[in-house]
Amino acid sequence: MSAVVDPLELLSQKGNRQPTFLGPIWNPLACGVAGVGAAIFINWGFRRPVFSGIQKHIAFGLIGLGAGYYFDQKRSEYLAKRDAVLRHYIELHPDDFPVKERKTYGQVLESWVPVR
């Protein structure tokens, strides 16, 4: 039941993995919460009530959402560019990446007998 693995196919194949609900909104949401937390920390540092100046909390939260979305887009661009460079390198140097057969753990690991 061993299949042949092509290195170029591994980089181009997306698979059947379904994105989670929080996947696309996790980074903006986390940065937005961090922005509100920064506003609370600033109020605490100046010895003011932590939720005073609610407009500051809203502004910091929106700035955090924008920054999280921006960083998420930059990360996606970086990963896409990296995959394209790797795919191109594999296309130019196919001798360095031979097609291999998949092995199971049973074929790779040695049998183990406990010594007591």
Image (tube, grey):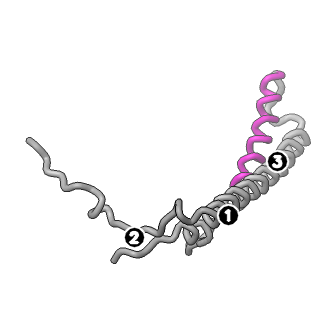
Query: Label 2 crowding class (10 Å Cα cut-off): few <14, some 14-19, many 20+?
Result: few
Quick check: 80 above or below 63?
A: below
Q: Is residue 7 left or right of residue 38?
A: left
Q: Which mark is residue 88?
A: 1
- Label 1: state its secondary structure: helix
Look at mark 3 in the image and give the residue it sits on: 67
Whichever of labels 3 and 2 marks the residue nearer the N terminus, that label is 3
- Which of these two is toward me, 4 or 32? 4
Please provide percent x and percent y for residue 43. Answer: 82, 29
Dividing the picture into quadrants, the one containing residue 2 is: bottom left
Find the magenta span and give its range: 26-46
Dividing the picture into quadrants, the one containing residue 19 is: bottom right
- Which of these two is toward me, 28 or 60? 28
Q: Residue at x 82, y 47 (%)?
A: 67
Q: Residue at x 31, y 61 (%)?
A: 105
Q: Which mark is residue 101?
A: 2
Please provide percent x and percent y for residue 107. Answer: 28, 63
Query: Label 1 crowding class (10 Å Cα cut-off): few <14, some 14-19, many 20+?
Result: few
Task: Between label 1 and label 3, give the one nearer the viewer.
Answer: 1
